[in-house]
Amino acid sequence: MDQPGPIGTSTCPNDDDDGSVGLDFRTSFQGSVVDEFHIIPLQLAYLDMNPAEDCWHEFMKVADRLQQFISLRGALSLLKKRKYLTFACEFDMYCYFNHEMALMLGPMTSDVETDTRHRDLAYDFLETSWCPPSPIGYGGRSDTLAKKKHEDDDGDHNGACASGTERDEDGIGSNDDHKGDGATGAENDDDADSVVIRSEFVRQMGAFALSKYSSSSCFRRFGVGSVQCGDVDDDDDGSLATMLYRFASPLQQFGEGIGNAVKMIDFDVFGSDGKCFGLRILVRDTAYAFGGFRASIKDRKGVGTTTIATARRANALDQTTVDLVEGTEIDRQYKPHGNLPLVAPNAAATTASGLNVHFDDSPFAPRIQQVRDHLAMQPFLAARLEIAKIIRVGIYLSYLPQSGSDFDARVRRYRLRLSSLREAKEISYRHFMRVFKGSMWEGLPVELVKRIIDFLPPTPKFMLRPT
C-alpha cells in the first residue's frame, strides 16, 4: 500500500484520487500530542461566511425575519391553517414596511408587487419543504381538515398576492383569528403546540436553505459520533449550519462585520478519574484583524448546552484569553491530571480570582510566569487551568478545514497521523465485511465490494486536506 504524500504538497484533493491525503478521525489522533491532552475529537463543522460565495446567506437573512414574523399574532394561525400563499404575501408586506429588513437586504422598490423575493422564498419553503409537526391544525382541528382548508387557498403563486378580500378573511388582522383566545390576532400562540411549531419551523428552514441554496463548499462537516458522552450525530447539517450562522451574525450588529468563516469542534475530555467531559467550541473570526477570533465553549450535556467559558484574541500578535464562566461546573466534571503538555513555551495564567487564563501566542510578549508555577501556588485551580489549556488546543484544531496551510500547521504541531483516501476505503471495506458477515452479502467478490465502496460518497470520518 502506497504511503500518503509528505505534508505540504500542493496536490488538489480529489475524491477520485485514492492517494489524496487527509485525516481519519478514527486513527489520526491516536498517539498524537492531542492524545496527550486526553482529548478525543469527535466532529468538526465549517461554515463559509463570505456572502459573495453563496446565496444561502441571503436566504438566512430572510429566515431571520421569518422567525420574527411567525411570532406575530395571526401569522402562526395562517401557518397552522396551511394558508401558505396568504402567509407568504403577508410576510412580503411585513418586510416591505420594515425599514430594518430594507437595510439588511438592500434597497427595495417602491412597488411591493414588483419585488417578490421575500414572498417567493417563504412560499418555496412552505410549499416544497415544510413538514408540520403532529398534531397540527387550527383550534384543535384534525390534520385532514386543516389540509382540506389549504386546498381552498390555491391562488396563482407567480401572479399578484392574495386579494384584499382574502387578506381581510385570512390575513394577520383577520377577525376570524380572534376566536381562539379573544385577543386581536391569532389563537393562543403560547400553547405547547405553537412552541413546537415555531421550533420545528426554524430547524426546517435551516435544512431547506442548506440543501437548496448552498454550494458544497459553503458548509462542511467531518467526524464521528461520541460513544462516551452522548451521540453528536443527532444534529443534522441544516441545524448545525443554522447554529453557526446565528453564532456569527451578532458581529454585524456591533460593526465588526463577519470574518471568513465560523467553526465548530466537538470533543470529549477525560479526567484523571476516567470520567468524560463533553465540550463544544464555536469559533468566529473577526473580519478586520488577521488572526483575531471570539469563541464560546459549551458543556454538551448541560441544560441548553451551558456556556462554561469564552475565549478571544484581538489579532495574530495578541494573546489568547480564556474566561472561565462556570468554574464550579468544571471542578465538578473534570479531575486534573497534573501533567498536561505546555500549550506554548511562554504560556501563562492570571491568578486574579482564577477566572481569566491567558495564553500568549506572540513571540514578542514580555517575560511572564509559566502555567506550572501557578499550579504549584494554587492547586485548587488545577482543573480550571487544565481545561483552559484544553480549550486553547480545541480552538487551534477547529481551523483544520479552513485552508491547506492551516491544516499543515496543525498536523505538524500536534503530530497528527496522515492517511490516504485509499486507507480510508480499506477501513470501510473491513467494516462492510464485518456488518454483513453471515449474510448472503458475505460471499460477494472482493473487487465488487470495493467497487461498491468507490461509488459511495467519501465518509465524513475522513477529512481531505483542503486546498
Image (cartoon, grey):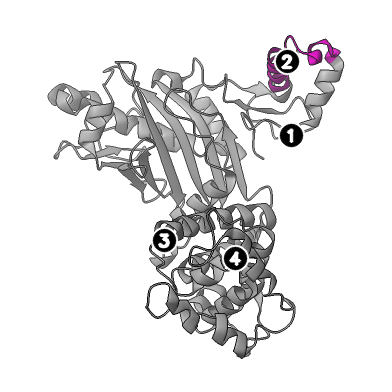
SS at mark 3?
helix
Total numbered labels placed on residues in the image: 4
- The residue pinned by badge 3 equals 250
For the residues labelled 4 and 2, say whether their Cβ atoms are less than 8 Å apart.
no
Alpha carbon distance from label 1 to label 2: 20 Å
SS at mark 2?
loop
Task: Tell me the tag on residue 457.
Answer: 1
Amino acid at circle 4: Glu
Mark 1 burial class by Cα count in 10 Å: few <14, some 14-19, many 20+: few
Q: Residue 193, relative to residue 183: is it above or below?
A: above
Nearer mark to the viewer, of 1 and 2: 2
Alpha carbon distance from label 4 to label 2: 45 Å
Task: Tell me the tag on residue 40.
Answer: none
- Viewport quadrant of the C terminus: top right
Q: Residue at x 60, y 65 (%)?
A: 146
Q: Give the range drawn in magenta.
A: 423-446
| x and y, in percent, of residue 331 in the image | 22, 29
* Residue in the foreground of this view, choosing between 134 and 389: 134
> In which quarter of the view is residue 374 placed?
top left
User: Which comes sooner in the sequence, label 3 or label 4?
Assistant: 4
Q: Residue 4, relative to residue 236: is it above or below?
A: above
Q: Residue 360, relative to residue 270: is it above or below?
A: below
Amino acid at circle 2: Phe
User: Which comes sooner in the sequence, label 4 or label 1?
Assistant: 4
- The residue pinned by badge 2 equals 436
Mark 3 burial class by Cα count in 10 Å: few <14, some 14-19, many 20+: few
User: Which comes sooner in the sequence, label 2 or label 3?
Assistant: 3
For residue 286, say whether it is visible: no
